[in-house]
Image (spheres, rainbow, N blue to C red):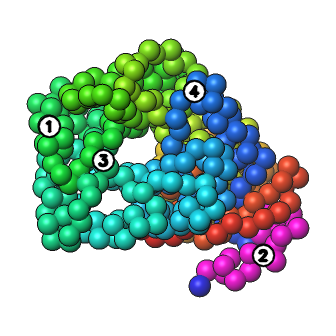
Amino acid sequence: MDFSLQSHKTFIGRPATDLPTPSLVLSKPILEKNTTQLLEDVKSLGIAFRPHVKTLKSIEVSRMMLGNGQHRGIVASTLCEIRGAVPLVQEGMLDECLYGVPVYPGVLPQLWELSKTVKILLMVDNEQHIDILEEYASSSGKTTPWPVFIKVDVGSHRAGLENSSPALPGLVRRAEASTAADVVGFYCHAGHSYAARTREAAEDVLTAELEGVVSASSHLNVEGDRKVIVSIGSTPTAHVVRALRASLPAHLVLELHAGNYPTNDLQQVSTGLVPESQQAVRILADVCSVYPDRNEALINAGTVALSKETSDSPGFGRVVDRPQWSVVRMSQEHGILGTSSGETAAAKFKVGQKVYLYCQHACITAAQYHVYYVVDEGDIVRETWVPWKGW
C-alpha cells in the first residue's frame, strides 16, 4: 500500500514542506478561484455547463465544479470516475453522466448497471456503435434507448466525425431510426485549442467549435418542442467563453464542458490565457544530489511523478521559485534539474532541500498520486483528499 494512504491525515495542520516526497500539493484557494470564475462565466451567458471530472478525479473537486448542485451533469472518461461520483447523486447534486469515450461492447453491462443509479449518456461517432447498442438490447432485454451524443471532430482529430464526412448524415439517420438510441445532442472537444497562444486564437477555436456542432445538428430531424444540446468546450476555450455572441436556432441548447480549468498547468499558461498564479497543483520533491561539473541537480521526481508532457515552457516541470530551472531529463524516479541561464546548481541547490515544481499537464500528473495534500494560503495542510484510481 502507498505510504500516503496510511499516513496522510497525520500531516493535517503541518507545513507542506513536512510532507514525504514526491507529493502532490493542491492549493484550495486557487482551486476555488478557478472553479468559481467559470461558474460565473457560464451564469452570465445563461448557458448549461457539464464539467469533466478527469483531472483530479475526486468527490470534493467534482462537488465544487458542479457548484454544489447548480449544474447537474458531468463528463467522465472512466467507469471509475462514474462510480466515484455516485455519492453526489445520493447528495441530490448529480442527475446524469456522459461516458466520454465512444462506446464499445465490453463497457455496456457496467454502464447499464450504473444507469440504475444515475442517468448514463453515451458517445457515438460510427454506425457500428448503433449496431452494438441494438445487439445489446436484443441480448440483454434492455427496452429503453440509450441517450447518445454524436461526436463531432472540429479539428483535434481524436474522436468524432468531421462535418465534411459523408458518414455523418448517415450516422445521424441511423441513430434516429434505431430503437436502441435517442439522439440528445452533438458534442465536440477542441483539443487543438491547446496550441492557441493568444486570446484571439482561442476565441477563433471557440467559434469553430460552435459552428461545427450547429452544422452537424442540421442533419437531425427536429419536430415540435424537441430540444437538442450542442456541447462545446476545452479548458482554453472555456477561458474565453465570455466571447460567445452567437444566436442559436430556438431548438438548440448550448452547453459548455471543460475539465482541466480547476488546476491549470504549464500547458495552460503557455496559451497566454492564464497567469502562473492560477496553477493549483505543485509537486513537492527532494534534492538528492548536486553536480557542479555539469551544472545540474537530481530530484526524486521523475517520469512517473510528472509525466513526459511538454509545452512552450522548457522541460517536463519547472521549479516554482527558480523559474530558470526545469526538469530537463528524466528516468522513472529520477529528475534532472538544468538551466540555460548563467545560474549555477551549486549556488541554487543543496542535498536535502525541498523544491516545488509546476507540472506540464495536471491531468496526467495527478493520476500518479494516491493522496492530494490540500493547503491554505500559508501552505499549511488543511485537508487530504483521496482520488479515484483505475479505469
Residue at 74% in and 80% down: 7
Q: Residue furthest front?
A: 224
Q: For mark 3, what is the residue?
A: 148
Q: For mark 4, what is the residue?
A: 46
Residue at 33% in and 41% down: 184
Q: Which amino acid does label 2 sit on?
A: Lys
Q: Given this view, does label 2 or label 1 mark the residue nearer the observer? A: 1
Q: Which amino acid does label 4 sit on?
A: Gly
Query: Which of the pair 328/249 is nearer the observer?
Result: 249
Looking at the image, tell me whether mark 1 or mark 4 is earlier in sequence order: 4
- Give the Cα separation between the discs numbered 3 and 2: 42 Å
- Give the Cα separation between the discs numbered 3 and 1: 13 Å
User: Where does residue 166 sit, x and y in percent of width and height?
Assistant: 11, 30
Q: Residues within 10 Å of mark 4 (few under 14, many from 20)?
A: few
- Horizontally, residue 255 falls left or right of residue 376, namely left
Q: What residue type is labelled 3?
A: Val
Residue 9: image tag? 2
